[in-house]
Amino acid sequence: MTSHGSRPPGCTGSTPFEEELVNAMNDFVNAAEAPDFDTAGIVRKTRRKRATAIAGIATALVVVGGGTALASINGGSDTSKPAAAGTVTAAPEAADPEAAYVVLEDSKYKLDFGGLSLDFAKQQLLKSQLKLGKVSEVDCGKNGKPGTVVEVSPHSPNAVPRGASISLILCAG
């Protein structure tokens, strides 16, 4: 064994075991290959995973909140319902097609109460900063679902200020 000062003083020769051990260690050092890392590939893969995760989260947010946003944008059309309207049944045909709509003075959108239950209509009034006025019922035959709003007063095209009282007329069945 010929290493620089690794042998204790007084030892002159090397044993066959030591020689075989040194040879085995040298063979291992000379034969072992350095690991090869594809750092650019690792970075690409990480960025792709991150982009996929962000796209998935954004898609989920759009699906959950997009309906509400789109309903708010389309709230001005006569055929759309408020986002929180839920299931709405067809209201009986009134003489005035605007009978179930309320227009706020400071807004260009119509609030559609047609087909809503009394509880939900109350929530919509509170949300719109309106007060509940008189609640009455009218016979609507087979055209409407009992307990749902058929008409509001005052109704569109008359605009009402926030804080105004709105009377509801429900279908009696």
Image: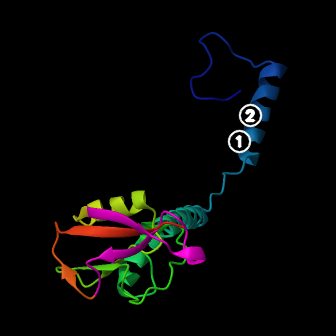
Task: In the rendered structure, find residue 117 and report the number of the disc placed on it.
Answer: none
In the rendered view, does 10 fall on the left or right side of 66? right
Location of the C terminus (image quadrant): bottom right
Q: Residue 158 occupies which quadrant of the picture?
A: bottom left
The furthest residue to the front: 139
Task: In the rendered structure, find residue 25 and report the number of the disc placed on it.
Answer: 2
Q: Is residue 96 magenta?
A: no
Q: Which residues are magenta?
A: 133-156
Neighbour class for label 2 at 10 Å: few (<14), some, many (≥20)? few
Residue 160 x %, y %: 19, 77
Whether 52 is drawn above or below 157: the answer is above
Give the CA separation, mark 2 to mark 1: 6 Å
Q: Is residue 135 magenta?
A: yes
130 or 139, which is in the foreground? 139
Neighbour class for label 1 at 10 Å: few (<14), some, many (≥20)? few
Residue 96 x %, y %: 38, 89
Q: Amino acid at mark 2?
A: Met
Q: Amino acid at mark 1?
A: Val
Q: Residue at x 59, y 12 (%)?
A: 9
Contact between labelled residues 1 and 2, with CB atoms less than 8 Å apart: yes
Q: Residue at x 60, y 13 (%)?
A: 8
Q: Residue at x 67, y 29 (%)?
A: 2
Q: Secondary structure at mark 1?
A: helix
Q: Residue at x 41, y 66 (%)?
A: 137
Residue 102 x %, y %: 29, 78
